[in-house]
Amino acid sequence: MPNLPRLRRGARGRAPVRPPEQPDTPNVEEIEACGLRWINIERPRQVDRAWLEEHFDFHSLDYEDVFSRNQRPKVDEYDDYLFVVLHFPRFDKQVGRLNAAELDVFVGSDFIITLPNEPIQPLEYLFERCRTGDELREQLFSKGAGYLLYKVVDDCVDASFPMLRKMGNKLERLEEEIFEGRSEEIVRDISNVKQEIINFRKIVRPQRAALRDLDRTRRYVPESLEVYFDDIVDASERIWDMLENYKEVVEALESTNESVISHRVNDVLRVLTSISVVVLPLTLVASVFGMNVHVPGQGSIEAFWIVIVAMVLMLGGMLGYFRHRGWL
């Protein structure tokens, strides 16, 4: 990687600089303790890039990755810092679907900069706890930038498990509804759950390689923290295994639902076919005696009742035979 100049030190302070009513003001929040700074910039804009370029010397390609919407998860090592791009699932209530929230992180010897392109609740919660809790701030910041990076990534990865539990509960509910006779009504629900699983897998699949690269890096991540990042990799693999299981479950539910609908249609067709077969000979007899030609018993009331009785017996015999064969 290119040899870059060291970062330039800016003004220090714990109070966040975040006036939302002034759009031209950098949206920068900063916490400092034990010689370590955590800078959080949510939804970075060009004015935030100008602030970063003023206070730090990062590679221009990294800035392009921060403001790119199609950046894949990765880990880039430089002489003076580490650049990490990660994606985490986030449910967008406006569109009602699962999307990827990108988190870009710069890690140095005495700083960590997080730049989420969308609000990430675990990251916001951890930042607020560090800002308001002196004991937690001292505990996390005293262990260095590598441990703080682990804590940020670990909280964001663990936030996927509640989403997966809700997804599992939804699959169980769909299974119950299938056998309660609501097969036609839940076709759209099955499709929505399947789409959620597909989107979740699209987020997690490339993330696994990036987390393994992060586990192998030794810049700002000493060997003492290797077991912590191994835990993140294990959590990511558990998430992937659950998604693989859910993928098989939703495919099985979809197949079962189609089979239930098919059996229901077959039952309807069987009844209609049986009715047609039963009525067919009766229609034939009525047609014969309804022809405009002379037939035996024509004009006799006794012949009429004989024909009616014969048709009733024929109907009863055919119904009994169909029931005996299990067709009705």
Image (cartoon, helix red, strand yellow):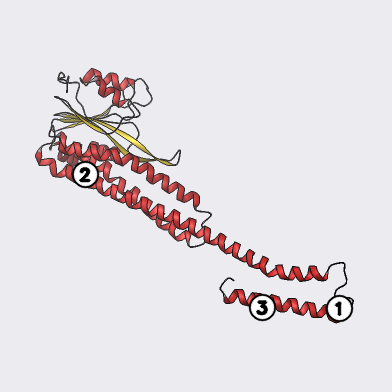
* First in sequence: mark 2 vs mark 3: 2
**Left or right position of 65 against 298:** left
Task: Name the disc covering residue 317, or none.
Answer: 3
Is residue 210 visible from the viewing direction of this image? yes
Give the quadrant of residue 273: bottom right
The amino acid at mark 3 is Gly
Which label lies toward us, 3 or 1? 1
Residue visible at 29% across and 21% down? 49
Which label lies toward us, 2 or 3? 3
Provide the secondary structure element on which disc 2 rests: helix
Q: Which residue is mark 1?
A: 297
The amino acid at mark 1 is Gly
The amino acid at mark 2 is Val
| Image x and y of residue 70, in percent | 34, 29
| Image x and y of residue 10, in percent | 19, 21
**Left or right position of 291 against 99:** right
